[in-house]
Image (cartoon, rainbow, N blue to C red):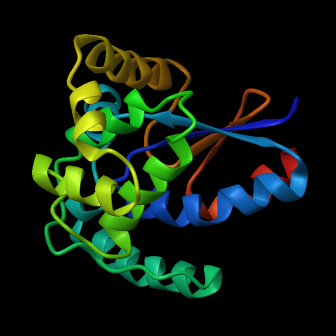
């Protein structure tokens, strides 16, 4: 497949969840490969001077309503995680450990679902293991892989590389070097393909 959508995400972002629920089908329609690029949204915010929408009360309130609108449009569940904001470092290290692994899509799906479909406290290692085990994966093995220095460095490098490319939040998609930010820009992603 020569066409690709690079998907920069952190499972802690509800808008990344909404985009992710649509991207596999969008890519299938267009004959494109979905390339997962795990990053740390907090690191991106820090590097770019950006802040979460909830940091601005009026924006946070509006965004909650807008998330509901998009979930309805996309016909997907969206359950606000009662532990939000969740420290996603462990989850994103697991997503990074799975880069290029055959289990990558299943791992990303399990992590997103555990954050926004059947919410749990993904900052806890035992919850990460449970979530992956319930998805038919070896949670303990993936947690162990995620704790290697190589994976930790790669996640940091992924985040730094995203910032260098102009990423300031999640979700961000690239098609042929063109950047598209937000779950509300997927029509432009599809047009670019």
123 sits left or right of 80 in the view: left
Residue at 18% across / 65% down in the picture? 84
Q: Is residue 69 above or below residue 162?
A: below
Residue 143 point in image, percent of width and height:
23, 36
Q: Is residue 58 above or below residue 96?
A: below
The front one of 38 and 44 is 38
Q: Number of marks in the image?
A: 0
Residue 44 point in image, percent of width and height:
34, 33
Can residue 20 be seen here? yes
The image quadrant that residue 43 belongs to is top left
The front one of 164 and 89 is 89
Residue at 26% across / 39% down in the picture? 42
17 sits left or right of 56 in the view: right
Residue 61 point in image, percent of width and height:
30, 79
79 sits left or right of 186 in the view: left
The image quadrant that residue 163 belongs to is top left
Residue at 41% across / 56% down in the picture? 136
Quarter the C terminus occupies: top right
Q: Is residue 79 above or below residue 128?
A: below
The front one of 67 and 119 is 119
The front one of 5 and 123 is 123
Quarter the N terminus occupies: top right
Residue at 40% across / 66% down in the picture? 113
Residue 47 point in image, percent of width and height:
30, 26
């Amino acid at each position: 497949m020569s066409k690709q959508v690079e998907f920069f995400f952190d499972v802690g972002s509800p808008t990344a969840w909404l985009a992710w629920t649509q991207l596999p089908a969008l890519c299938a329609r267009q004959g494109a490969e979905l390339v997962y690029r795990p990053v740390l949204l907090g690191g991106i915010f820090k590097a770019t001077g950006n802040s979460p929408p909830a940091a601005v009360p009026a924006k946070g309130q509006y965004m909650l309503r807008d998330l509901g609108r998009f979930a309805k449009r996309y016909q997907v569940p969206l359950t606000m995680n009662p532990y939000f904001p969740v420290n996603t470092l462990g989850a994103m290290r697991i997503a990074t450990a799975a880069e290029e692994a055959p289990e990558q899509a299943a791992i990303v799906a399990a992590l997103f679902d555990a954050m926004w479909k059947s919410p749990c406290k993904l900052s806890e290692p035992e919850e990460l293991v449970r979530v992956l085990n319930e998805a038919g994966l070896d949670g303990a093995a993936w947690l162990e892989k995620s704790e290697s220095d190589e994976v930790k460095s790669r996640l940091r490098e992924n985040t730094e590389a995203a910032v260098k490319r102009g990423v300031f939040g999640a979700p961000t998609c690239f098609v042929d070097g063109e950047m598209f930010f937000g779950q509300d820009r997927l029509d432009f992603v599809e047009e670019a393909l």
